Image (cartoon, rainbow, N blue to C red):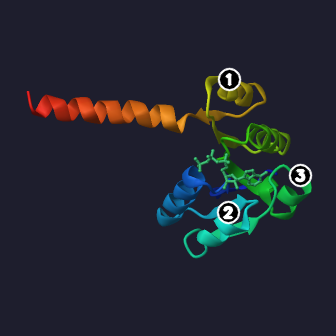
Amino acid sequence: MADKNRDPVAVIGLGRFGSALAIELTQRGTEVLGIDNNPKHVQDLSGLVTDIATADSTDLAALKQLGVPDFYRAVVAIGSDLEASILTASLLVELEIDHIWAKAVSRQHGRILRRIGVHHVVFPEHDMGERVAHLVSGRMLDYM
Ligand code: ATP
């Protein structure tokens, strides 16, 4: 795997978080492969994301068939289905993806993801709460 293409990003799970991420990356000129096991979620992104596929990301053979082992960066954007999130992340670790990002819905979820070898764990709801707090306090300062 010496010459993995460093540009494309595999985004696994195309719910609200994953689809926003996949669309934004595509608009910024990054090639994206979006994967979801729900055909409706995949269809909704048709034309908005570079490449999309319907597949179960807990299936190693499916990931291989889609060329995921050749990616340098991948994001696990599955949150509420903890089993699918952890299984998918562990397969990406097994495939030795260089930069694995995953979203976590709780501290425990984040801890498990880090323990199995995920490089970057994000907490979208928590992080957004902090950002909004900054915005709100900034706006309040304008009125003082
Ligand atoms: P969001 O808030 O981003 O909508 P969520 O955490 O509420 O996400 P989840 O149910 O965790 O939603 O799933 C996010 C996406 O991941 C969904 O579109 C779902 O179809 C997809 N997904 C769940 N399990 C798998 C899987 N095994 N393989 C591929 N995609 C999956």
Residue 35 is drawn in which quadrant? bottom right
Of the pair 102 and 130, the residue shown nearer to us:
130
Furthest residue in direction right, as rendered? 61
Q: Which mark is residue 33?
A: 2
Alpha carbon distance from label 1 to label 2: 28 Å
Residue 33 is drawn in which quadrant? bottom right
Which residue was labeled with disc 3? 60
For badge 1, the amino acid type reads Gln
Q: Please, is residue 96 above or below residue 21 in the view? A: above
Furthest residue in direction left, as rendered? 144
In terms of sequence position, does the residue under pointer 3 or pointer 2 come before the other? 2
Q: Provide residue 139's location: percent of width, then percent of height.
A: 19, 35
Q: Please, is residue 26 above or below residue 15 in the view? A: below
Alpha carbon distance from label 1 to label 3: 25 Å
For badge 2, the amino acid type reads Leu
Q: Which mark is residue 108?
A: 1
Residue at image location 24% in from the left, 29% down from the top: 137
